[in-house]
Image: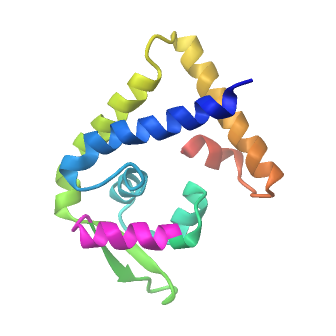
Amino acid sequence: MKILKWLSVADRFYKIYLDKQLGPFGINSSQHMFLTKICASPGISQDSLIDMFYVHPSNIVRTVAALEKQGMITRSPNDQDKRTWKLYPTDRALSVIEEIQAACERTEALLLKDMSEAEKKLFADLLMQSGKNITAELHIERTEEEFHER
């Protein structure tokens, strides 16, 4: 089977394609998910992004810092827990988020090109199952809702 090879190829080249789409907005393919979530949930806690996106806390800190430096988000201390931050989109982020989402939709459409609706659903379901399998093997617990939310 060549699944690992083609997962790697698709991952690498969709990121290159998406980076070109997102470049004019000053963000990249590793930042768009965070910015989209922050715009959809102003005041979201920085810590909640860790579980949401299956990444190491240091990656969250680095991405949040980059988005803040680019003028896309602001951070404020969490009143309930002074060790954490609440994240808010800036006017700049809100003014471009629809274009960012459209770029992501174009990229997804390209990945799914020439697939029937049934094939697209099957592909998404199989990718989700693969994610569940690997996270379970690594003892990374997720709820069913978390898998469907992403």
Residue 115 placement, left or right of 77:
right
Q: In the image, is residue 99 part of the stretch drawn in magenta?
A: no
Quadrant for the N terminus, please: top right
Q: Residue at image x 26%, y 39%?
A: 21
Name the residue at the bottom extreme: 82
31 shown above or below 74? above
- Residue 12 or 149: which is nearer the viewer? 12
Residue 123 placement, left or right of 73:
right
Residue 140 visible in this rendered orientation of the protein: yes
Q: Residue at image x 43%, y 71%?
A: 62
Q: In the image, is residue 61 part of the stretch drawn in magenta?
A: yes
Where does residue 74 sit, x and y in percent of width and height? 29, 73
Q: Residue at image x 67%, y 34%?
A: 4
Quadrant for the C terminus, please: top right
The residue segment tinted magenta is 59-72
74 shown above or below 106? below
What's the colour scheme? rainbow
Where does residue 112 sit, x and y in percent of width and height? 47, 21
Q: Residue at image x 27%, y 45%?
A: 22
14 shown above or below 150? above
